[in-house]
Amino acid sequence: MYFFRTSIKSVAGLVLAGTLSMLGGCGGGGATDPFASTPAPAAVSVNPATVTLYAGVPATVTLTSGVGPFQVFSSNPTVLPVTQLVSGAAITLVANPIDTEQTVTLTVLDAYYGNSRAATVAVTVKPSPLLSTLTVTPRASSPCGSSSTGSTGSAAATGPASVCSGDTATATVTLKGANLAALPNRQVRFDVVQGPYSFAVDQAATVFAKTLTAVTDQNGQALVSLRTDVVPSQVALIRATDVTSGNRVDTSFTILEQTNGTAVLSVVPATYTVKGFYTGECPASAGDYVLYGGVPPYTVVSGLPNAVTLTSNSISGQSITVGRSGGVFTASNGSSAGCGGYTAPLTITDSAGRTITAQYVVQPGTTDRPTPPAPDALVLTPTSVTRTAVAGFCAPGVLYFTISGGSSPYRVGASVAGFTATLGTDGTTLTLQWTSATVFPTGTSVNAIVLDSLGKVATAAVTCS
């Protein structure tokens, strides 16, 4: 009898061994050990691990591995503040102004390992140069007007320059250190941002380019010459960038059309357009216009006085007066629902009787307003979740749902035994979790359920596929 039982066991063992041997020799036939453990994820890593940046100039480091969400901590938040919680794969760094070079260490934690396997980034923060206003100055004998200046990081000009079409001008900017000392021998790149003009590459002005790098002199000033094309009146934009730090300054100027040495009566922009977002709704807005040429003063009249109001020198009405070439007036409208859009002609007349017209265009949006859910509707968000199966089963996990609407307090539950639903201390978070003891095969689903105090029920489906 003992021999019989032993023989059966031996035969069973041989059969099992043979079966496993056949599975192992199938040449990648897709067999997977359902009891194999899932490998641990890679620890968080950051690229690059060493960064040099200049105060005020953004830089980015990338999270190349780890489990999100991530946390970031700065060893000196006064110099380099950071957003502590990072949900994506990039960290944007912008340092505050400093007088001397500083070293800061960033510590990055992921959601899986936390402090046990943190990554660090060594950051060297250098002072950025101070760029003075970028100034565009027309040639001394130009009939078209004055200089313009723009401050760091701004594309706006105060007193925009007027450069005749087909004429020349200069653009200058001064670089200073944190101690306000001039920075000589520093490269500054000038760029055409918008408009028909170019920079003179050689002193004879025979070669022109849209980008030109100049070197600051002993006073820290960089200067380039530019020439405008022969074009109708329009706005142009220019930028100067410190090549070393990336710090930059923008400004604008106006190219003026002229006839027989006299600037033509013109308005910039010729058309201002404001567009709403939602269908049938027009937003309130205001647009500035600059007048050039002709014989000032100018009279401006709104063709739709009930819809568009004109303002100049704090005086508003259907008709206003602009006293000088380069003067500004503002057209504005109020918001309105059930708006089909309209165009208001703005008639401009100079003292010699010459007339031109600008337009102020108001357009409704094209997006339908979303329909808000009923105030008492009970909702679980998200309404559905799909988990990816491995070897025919979904791994243990934890899911979070937000409860909104209905009438609190709420009660929560799960539709399948082995899945546990709990209500968070905030009273609106439903947590659904299951362990390795719960079998969650492909093609099955479980519902997270919430019941409010009035008997309303909402569900969210979790599917294994």
Image: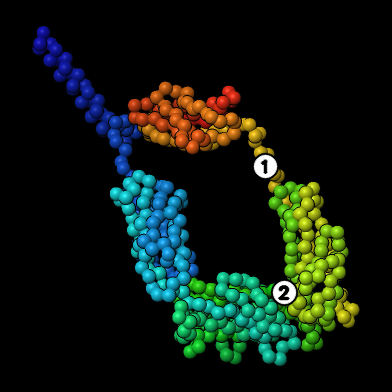
Question: How many tags in the picture?
Answer: 2
Q: Is residue 345 left or right of residue 379?
A: right
Q: Quadrant of the N terminus?
A: top left
2 or 1: mark nearer the eye:
1
Q: Callout 2: few (<14), some (14-19), or many (20+) C-alpha neighbours within 10 Å? A: some
User: Can you give x and y, in whole percent of width and height, for residue 59 in the image?
Assistant: 45, 64
Residue at figure coordinates x 52%, y 75% from the top left = 241
List the residue tagged with mark 1.
Answer: 370
Of callouts 2 and 1, the N-terminal one:
2
Q: Secondary structure at mark 1?
A: loop
Q: Quadrant of residue 212?
A: bottom right
Task: Tell me the kind of residue under disc 2.
Answer: Gln
Residue 376 to residue 70: above or below: above
Q: Give the residue displayed 68% in from the left and 77% down from the top.
A: 160
Residue visible at 71% across and 81% down in the picture:
162
Residue located at (86% from left, 61% from top): 304
Quadrant for residue 404, please give it.
top right
Residue 242, given in percent of the width and then of the height, sits at: 50, 76
Q: Position of residue 61 (x, y in %)?
A: 42, 60
Mark 1 residue type: Pro
- In the image, is residue 350 above or below residue 143? above
Q: Is residue 461 above or below residue 202?
A: above
Q: How is the image coloured?
A: rainbow
Q: Residue 234 has which mark?
A: 2
Residue 454: x %, y % from top left: 59, 24
Residue found farthest to the top: 1
Any part of residue 457 in sight: no
